[in-house]
């Protein structure tokens, strides 16, 4: 194998070694012999340097004509489009999802970037006739300042893009912290910004442990907004740090997303949609369906059909085109998922399909867990309450639609939910009463690229992302008055 490459932080337009001089190896989750690269173990001081650079760059970038900023970002989008194949392959190697899933990220990224470039032409404010003679008043939208973008590993290319591009289009500067497990995708992104000729300091990246430098970023007084995607516990910490200096937050956090099935004629379609939503990206999506809540009369047939779909998954290294499910991201995540499956057995639930870690041959080089369906789960069980973030679907039987809604809402989370039903009354009630940011009827939890995205309760706080709603996070107002004296 080639010599392992060492990568750096990207601060003020320069590739910069961490002050500690320390690095860590990033390992391919599908093959532990394959080291993707060595990456910086940054400290608080590196984060401070990045914030300072972003702060220096803010004055010029925020005052630049939007059309000039747009040209820079447009160059980036063209490069992104040209490099999709290469990025997809690197992403598959670093994160472990299948090549097809990995290639979806830059492809979708191009579409979403183009949409947000359009939003850049609609940074409209508010004007009104004044109630005083000779007075003109304009509420203009203005950028907030330095934005920290903190991202998870599960969509290591798309999630950072969804944060950085809107920040730049609206005139902010950025300090980006990629997840510890996926720094290489961060490096690829920065390389494209560098090639696109973005002015130094407009986008900066510090790599390392969130537990070491996270507080330094989200607690920094010059950071005016933090856009975060990750777990609810880290989101809570960031919210506390931000409150100390009144920084804005956009928090996208965990989920325990239900799919309710009640009075639906096409159980086969429901099974296909639920299995896809539960097991895509090895179940490591924030919007994964993880709880099936089904009327007792449908349960047996539906569970059987879902199990049939699950048997079709081929596990292995995602680079192999035959493979349809990759490993989980790392050993610690794998152990935690296996402990959840065991807790369900201990609580009296039934592992209907899967439930094992695969071993032998290539499977020993990563952490591969069979797609798992657990039935006879009751609402109080740990697997019914906590986010598992792996290829595990639990099935809870209920006796009425009222009970289904009560179980669906009895969670700290509120990200996404699905209902499969032909009953208009159920559909109406679901869309009104489900306590989630996104409510899907008769399909899984796939979203549109340009629609607002977000959650409520423990799943989200602040403006919804992706769509036009993003402007409410990345911008504030300045209300200007002019008095004319004749
Ligand atoms: P995580 O542990 O919360 O980490 C997310 C990011 O926060 C990582 O970059 C992490 O750095 C960083 N971080 C850790 N501690 C920090 C601190 N004290 N201050 C600031 N940053 C800190 O989440 P994950 O395990 O990577 O991702 C899985 C979670 O993300 C799941 O809960 C999933 O539901 C959620 N998620 C939500 C959405 C959504 O849109 N709602 C989308 C995708 C994922 P390190 O990597 O260095 O620890
Ligand atoms: Mg890794």
Image (cartoon, rainbow, N blue to C red):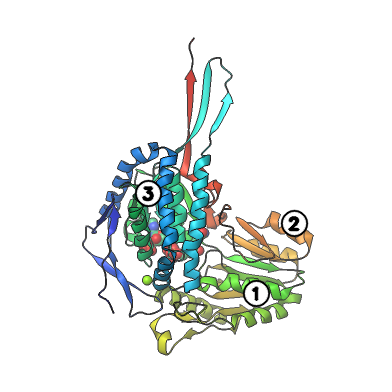
Answer with the quadrant where ligand 1 appears in the image. bottom left
Q: Which residue is mark 1?
A: 272
Which numbered tag is attached to residue 429?
none
Q: Answer few, some or many: residues within 10 Å of disc 2's Cα (few below 14, many 20 plus, some between 14 and 19).
A: few
Kindly indicate the quadrant of the structure image that contains residue 52.
Answer: top left
Q: Nearer the viewer, mark 2 or mark 1?
A: 1
Between 146 and 417, the one nearer to me in the picture: 146
Distance from disc 2 to disc 3, alpha carbons, whole Å, reads 41 Å
Residue 61 x %, y %: 37, 41
Q: Residues within 10 Å of mark 3 (few under 14, many from 20)?
A: many
Position of 415 with respect to 223 (left or right) is right
Dot 1: within a 10 Å radius of its alpha carbon, few (fewer than 14), some, or many (20 or more) residues?
many
**Circle 3 is placed at which residue position?**
174
Judging by the rendered image, the residue that carries numbered circle 2 is 428
User: Which mark sits nearer the N-terminus, 2 or 3?
Assistant: 3
x and y percentages locating residue 199 in the rendered image:
32, 46
C-alpha gap between disc 2 and disc 1 = 23 Å
Disc 1 + disc 3, Cβ < 8 Å: no
Is residue 234 visible to us here? no
Alpha-carbon distance for marks 1 and 3?
40 Å
Residue lying at the far bottom of the rendered structure: 360
Task: Determine the secondary structure under disc 2.
Answer: helix
């Amino acid at each position: 194998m080639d010599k392992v490459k060492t990568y750096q932080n990207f601060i003020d337009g320069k590739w910069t070694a961490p002050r500690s001089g320390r690095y860590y190896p990033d390992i391919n989750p599908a093959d532990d012999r394959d080291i993707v690269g060595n990456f910086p173990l940054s400290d608080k001081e590196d984060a401070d340097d990045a914030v300072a650079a972003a702060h220096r760059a803010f004055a010029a970038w925020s005052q630049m004509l939007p059309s000039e900023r747009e040209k820079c970002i447009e160059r980036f989008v063209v490069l992104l489009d040209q490099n999709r194949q290469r990025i997809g392959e690197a992403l598959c190697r670093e994160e472990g999802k299948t090549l097809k899933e990995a290639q979806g990220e830059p492809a979708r990224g191009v579409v979403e970037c183009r949409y947000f470039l359009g939003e850049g032409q609609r940074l409209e404010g508010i004007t009104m006739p004044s109630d005083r003679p000779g007075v003109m008043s304009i509420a203009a939208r203005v950028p907030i300042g330095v934005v920290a973008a903190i991202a998870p590993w599960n969509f290591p290319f798309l999630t950072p893009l969804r944060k950085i591009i809107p920040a730049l289009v609206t005139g902010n500067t950025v300090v980006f912290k990629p997840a510890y497990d996926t720094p290489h995708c961060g490096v690829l992104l920065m390389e494209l910004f560098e090639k696109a000729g973005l002015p130094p300091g407009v986008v900066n990246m510090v790599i390392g442990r969130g537990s070491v430098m996270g507080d330094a970023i989200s607690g920094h007084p010059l950071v005016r907004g933090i856009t975060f995607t990750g777990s609810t516990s880290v989101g809570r910490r960031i919210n506390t740090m931000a409150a100390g200096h009144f920084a804005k937050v956009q928090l996208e956090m965990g989920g325990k997303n239900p799919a309710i099935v009640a009075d639906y004629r096409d159980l086969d379609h429901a099974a296909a949609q639920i299995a896809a939503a539960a097991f895509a990206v090895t179940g490591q999506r924030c919007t994964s369906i993880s709880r099936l809540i089904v009327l007792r009369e449908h349960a047996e047939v539906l569970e059987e059909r879902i199990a049939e779909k699950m048997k079709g998954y081929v596990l292995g290294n995602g680079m192999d085109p035959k493979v349809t499910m990759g490993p989980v991201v790392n050993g610690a995540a794998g152990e935690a998922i296996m402990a959840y499956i065991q807790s369900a057995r201990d609580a009296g639930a039934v592992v209907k399909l899967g439930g094992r870690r695969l071993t032998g041959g290539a499977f020993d080089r990563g952490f591969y867990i069979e797609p798992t369906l657990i039935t006879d789960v009751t609402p109080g069980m740990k697997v019914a309450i906590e986010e598992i973030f792996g290829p595990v679907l639990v099935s809870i039987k209920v006796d009425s639609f009222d009970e289904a809604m009560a179980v669906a809402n009895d969670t700290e989370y509120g990200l996404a939910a699905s209902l499969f039903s032909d009953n208009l009354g159920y559909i109406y009630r679901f869309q009104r009463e489900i306590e989630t940011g996104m409510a899907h009827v008769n399909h899984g939890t796939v979203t549109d690229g340009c629609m607002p995205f977000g959650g409520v309760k423990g799943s989200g706080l602040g403006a919804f992302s992706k769509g036009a709603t993003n402007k409410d996070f990345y911008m504030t107002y300045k209300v200007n008055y002019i008095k004319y004296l004749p």
